[in-house]
Amino acid sequence: MKTVEKTGYNTFPDNWDKIIELTNTVGGEYDHVTNSRELAIIDADYVRDHSSGLDESIIPDDMTLDDIIKGAPITYLTLFDPAPIGSYRNIQDVIVDYLYVYFDLKSHQIEKIDKNPAASSEDEMKKFADSRLDEVVWDYATEYACAGKYKGEDFEIIRYDMVQTWLDKQSEYYDECGFTGPHCQYQTDYQWELAGHAYTQKDVFVDGSGKYLILTNCRKPAAIAFVVK
């Protein structure tokens, strides 16, 4: 639970202090207006009632929504953002960002591929995968990559020192595949009435040893942290 000022959409504008100052300048000392602000108590029930797109399944098992509210930079404006749809960030985005910081996941994201990553062997990759995933589909694994699930979420593990071999293999399935910052993007070209492209992407992390790249669409930071760290 936290107490926040009701500043933002349909409440007090960001320049409320200036409005009070100008009002008192015009009105003089006998018509003085106090700079009062209305407060809102934000707790788990308040967030549930006043937010859209909230998925509490992303919250770690040992935390509650109230724990998140205490630590995350949630303001009144977070729940009632008047920004255009194109730049709108709902409560889910704020919670995910907070948990990324909480689990230090940003330090495991990549900006570009390391040309001299730490080396690993196929056996080491298998041991790593078995220690991090609940199940691994070994029938489709290669000497340089494997995939499986942790808590129902899909993860792919790639030996960092063989990432180019993995990329070459993707060219058999996609027209283009490559890394752009902390994402791996897959492109499929199509020729229907109009030519075009279809894109999918996954988030990319590097594990603590620097030996493996981990690709996933998982939106649960706690699950990502367990596999990555």
Image: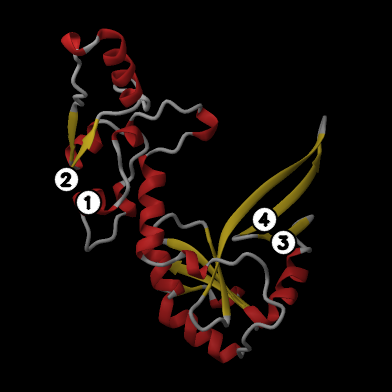
For the C terminus, give its image quadrant: bottom left
Tell me the residue that label 4 is attached to.
185
Residue 59 spot, x, y in % from top left: 30, 55
Residue 139 appearing in the image: yes
Is residue 30 rendered to the left or right of residue 227? left
Residue 76 spot, x, y in % from top left: 29, 34
Q: Residues under labels 4 and 1: Cα distance?
A: 35 Å
Tell me the residue that label 2 is attached to.
1
Cβ atoms under marks 4 and 1 closer than 8 Å: no
Q: Residue at x 54, y 66 (%)?
A: 109
Q: Residues under labels 1 and 3: Cα distance?
A: 39 Å
Cβ atoms under marks 4 and 3 closer than 8 Å: yes
The circle on residue 70 is 1
Q: Residue at x 35, y 36 (%)?
A: 78
Tell me the residue that label 3 is attached to.
178
Is residue 211 rendered to the left or right of residue 197? left
Residue 144 appearing in the image: no
Q: Earlier in the sequence, mark 3 or mark 2?
A: 2
Cβ atoms under marks 2 and 4 closer than 8 Å: no
Amino acid beneath label 2:
Met
Cβ atoms under marks 1 and 2 closer than 8 Å: yes
Q: Is residue 127 above or below residue 29?
A: below
* Quarter of the view holding residue 39: top left
Residue 37 spot, x, y in % from top left: 21, 26
Q: Residues under labels 1 and 2: Cα distance?
A: 6 Å
User: Dot 1: what SS?
Assistant: helix
Residue 228 spot, x, y in % from top left: 46, 73
How many neighbours does mark 1 have within 10 angstroms: few (below 14), some (14-19), or many (20 or more)?
Answer: some
Amino acid beneath label 4:
Gln
Is residue 107 rendered to the left or right of residue 174? left
Q: Earlier in the sequence, mark 1 or mark 3?
A: 1
Q: Earlier in the sequence, mark 2 or mark 4?
A: 2
